[in-house]
Every structure is written in structure tokens, then in C-alpha cells.
Image (cartoon, grey):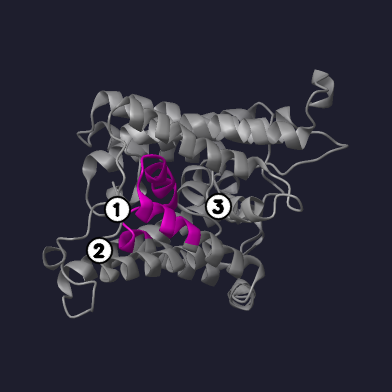
Amino acid sequence: MYEALGITALSAPQAAIVLGALLGLTFGALAEVTKFCFRRAVVGDRPALGVWAAGLVTALLGTQAAVSAGLIGFSDHRFFAADLPVAAIVIGGLLFGAGMVLTRGCVSRLTVLLGSGNLRALTVLLVFAVTAHATLKGVLAPLRVALGQITLPLGEAVSLANWPGGAALWTAVIALAALAIALRSGAKPLHLGLAALLGLLVPAGWVGTGFVLFDDFDPIAMESLSFTSPMAETLFWGVASTSIPASFGVGLVGGVIAGAAVLSLIGGRFAWQSFESPRQTGRYVLGAVLMGIGGVLAGGCTVGAGLSGIPTLSLAAILALAAIAAGGVATDRLLARAPSIPGYGARAAIPQVQPAE
């Protein structure tokens, strides 16, 4: 498709960087205004849950519309491996969920916060990126490989599109459930509307990389909004750009930071923030490590496996998000009820910890 457009100024990989940056700018701006964050939804913030659900509705409907139109397909995507790596997904999801509660923000939210001047977010994202890369290709890779070998053979059942009722039924079920949550959440109508626009960035990413930029002679990976691999790619591109080319993910991360910075400055919400104690720093670093390992094992974060993954109707993505939610809820309750844990006790006992959101 890209070759047919006759664009010669940029190659398909170069155009993917531009696409990632544009999607990132829009995501960063919308997420900064709406405080789009799965962690807040998990720990009991009903309006936050509604905002997240509103984004999922449009992400799902847009993605499945593109599939129905024959623009994209997911049969070869990693979400649809016939042998479901159940141990890696569940353990990774639980770790990621615990980490996002310790850092008071999932990776996408922390990227937005970095754009608004939060230096705690910068520290977390650096540790997260290094840990994620170590789990992908470094010293922690054997753990990933070992857990990935514990699988559940599902065959075609790994996609809800192959379940009774097909894609149309399961798209309707998930979309209606998410819509009901959004409408009953008490979130501001403006925020629900902006979140719905944010959700449309997901099919835009899938179609952009999987159809518009498809080029037989210069292929790129089909991908959409995600933050685990892109964050690692951005870190190592930043320190070795002469040998590591930029990618869609690098453009996405840079765009999110820039978009959030612009909107926070316009809205007067930009403010430099940092850690207030070594204990607080330790909590956030531990959370970053858990998210780095967990994001890779689970196959993505709350955006990569959740907002972008569930619209593909992948059972693996649904399982990953469920495990992330379970890990987040369990950790939140532990922190509220276990003051004996050094540095991570009841929230009332640690007033110095500033909410990331």
C-alpha cells in the first residue's frame, strides 16, 4: 500500500517514526487532560475506570471494523500463538500490577507525567526500560524463556473470533460491557468523550503500520500503542543512535512526552516534582523493576496488552490485563493493611508519598 501511494521522501520505516510521533502527541495530550490511567481504575477510582473503559470501546470497535474491512489481520501476531504461555502471562501480569501500584502509575501514565515535569516518573521509566531490556535480551532472558515454555495448547481458541458467536458477538459483548461501565462511572462527559477519541488511536496505529505503511520491499512490524518495548527501544536509541535506528516506538514515546508537556503548560499544570525521601525512592525503583520484568513476561503493559491488545480479541491479552488488575488490587490492599513492611506500610503512615496522578 505504501509503495502505491507514491511517497518517495520517506521510506516506510521512516514514515512509521512520524506516525508514531503523531499518535504519541495526540495520546499525550488527551491522556494528560483526562488523567487516563489503569492503575487509578484498579484501586477504586470509578471515574478513572469509566474513562479507561470509554477508550476501550472505541479502540475495540475501530480495530474490529478494520479487520472486517480486510485492512488488517492478526493471525500472525504474537498475541495469537497457538500455545498460550500461561505461566509467563499470569506471573508477568501480577508483577506488573504490583509494580504500577508501588510507582502510583502504569507506564503510559508515567510517560505522560514525565512530560508534565515529574522527575519521579523519569527515574521509574529509566529503571523500567533497563529491566525490560534485560528481560528481553539480557541477564533475565533465561527467566522469560523458562516461563514461556509452560504453555496451554489452545490452537485457534486463542482468539475470541473463533469462539461460538464469532468476532461480532464478542466485540458486542465487550463493547457493551465497557460502555455500561463508562456511562455509570460518574466521569465527566468531556473526559469520556476525549477518552473515546484517545481509543481511536489504537486502530489508527494498527491500520497505519499494518496497511497504509505496508511495503513488501521495506517491511515494518504491525503495531499500535504500547510502552514496554518502545520504552526500551527509546532508551537504547538515545544512547546508541548511530548504530540503533529509530522506530515507531521511539516516535511514540517522544510524541507522548511532548504532547503531555504542551497540554500541561497550556493548562498551568506543569510542575517539577521529585522524590522526598530515600524510602520513597526505593518504593518507586522496586515498582519499576517489577513492571519491567512483568511487562515483558505478560506481553505488554496496560496499554499494549490492554487498550491495544483486547481489541484484537486475543485471549492472551485479556488474560494479561486480568492478571495486571489482580496484581494491582492485591498490592494496593497489602499496602493499606501491612504497616510492618519497611517503607511500604499503610498509606496513612507515609504522607510524604505524592500521588503520581
Name the amino acid, label 3.
Met
- Quarter location, residue 12: top right
Disc 2 on helix, strand or loop?
A: helix
Query: 9 and 157: which one is in front?
Result: 9
* Residue hosting label 1: 42
* Residue hosting label 3: 231
Residue 142 lies, in percent from the top left, at 64, 78
Indicate which disc, 2 or 1, sits on the residue closer to the N terminus: 1
Residue 97 lies, in percent from the top left, at 38, 61
Residue 111, compared with residue 324, is above or below; it is above
Q: Return the residue found at the far top.
A: 6
Q: Quick one: label 1, few (<14), some, or many (20+) residues within 10 Å?
A: many
The answer, for residue 179, to whether it is visible in the render is no
Residue 161 shown left or right of residue 197 in the figure = right
Point 27% across, 71% down: residue? 279
Disc 1 on helix, strand or loop?
A: helix
Query: 327 and 244: which one is in front?
Result: 244
Instruction: Return the mark for residue 332.
Output: 2
Indicate which disc, 3 or 2, sits on the residue closer to the N terminus: 3
Disc 3 on helix, strand or loop?
A: helix
Residue 125 magenta-drawn?
yes
Residue 149 lies, in percent from the top left, at 64, 75
Point 38% across, 64% down: residue? 99
Name the amino acid, label 1.
Val
Residue 161 lies, in percent from the top left, at 58, 44
* Magenta span of residues: 100-126
Image mark count: 3
Overall secondary structure of the magenta section: helix
Q: Are the residues at dot 2 and dot 1 in contact (C-beta closer than 8 Å)?
A: yes
Name the amino acid, label 2.
Asp
Indicate which disc, 1 or 3, sits on the residue closer to the N terminus: 1
Q: Are the residues at dot 1 and dot 3 in contact (C-beta closer than 8 Å)?
A: no
